[in-house]
Amino acid sequence: MTLGRGRPLFGVDFSELPNIVDRQRVLGAGIFGVGWGLSGYCPGPAIVAAGFGDWHVWLLAAMLIGIVGARAAALRGGYLTLST
């Protein structure tokens, strides 16, 4: 258990992710790495830099567009289902 908790603060239980290497994960990791390399920013520091008015705010916008686009593609392809 994490920090002695029986369950997470914002979830039902601690579950292990499957240890699967598939096309989507390899492609996603590659896109993430190329984006990181081209921008020179890790996503966390990019958010902090945007908060300080750094001109790399475009990177934050691109990250959000990528997140929304990937989620839409996963929903359309049947890889992800939304639960209520």
Image: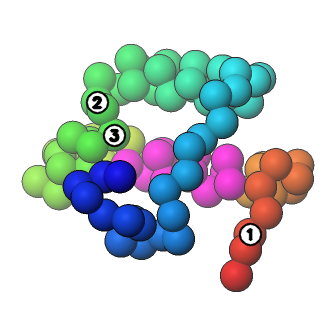
- The residue beneath circle 2 is 41
Confirm or deny contact between disc 2 and disc 1 (CB under 8 A): no
Kind of element beneath mark 1: loop
Is 23 in front, or is 68? Answer: 23
Q: Main secondary structure of the magenta part?
A: helix
* C-alpha separation, residue under disc 2 versus residue under disc 1: 31 Å
Mark in the foreground, 2 or 1? 1
Rendering coords of residue 25 (x, y %): 66, 28
- From the viewer's perspective, tell me whether residue 26 is left or right of residue 34: right
Q: Pointers 3 and 2 in contact (CB under 8 A)?
A: yes
Q: Mark 1: give few (<14), some (14-19) or many (20+) Cα within 10 Å.
A: few
Q: Which residue is mark 3?
A: 43
Q: Residue at x 55, y 52 (%)?
A: 15
Give the mark, 2 or 1, whose residue is nearer the N terminus.
2
The residue segment tinted magenta is 60-71
Quarter occupied by residue 45: top left
Which disc number belongs to residue 82? 1
- Marks 3, 1: nearer the viewer: 1
Residue 27 visible from this viewpoint: no
Q: Position of residue 62 (x, y in %)?
A: 48, 45
Under mark 3, the amino acid is Pro
Distance between the alpha carbons at the discs numbered 3 and 1: 25 Å
In the image, residue 54 sits, relative to residue 72, either above or below, namely above
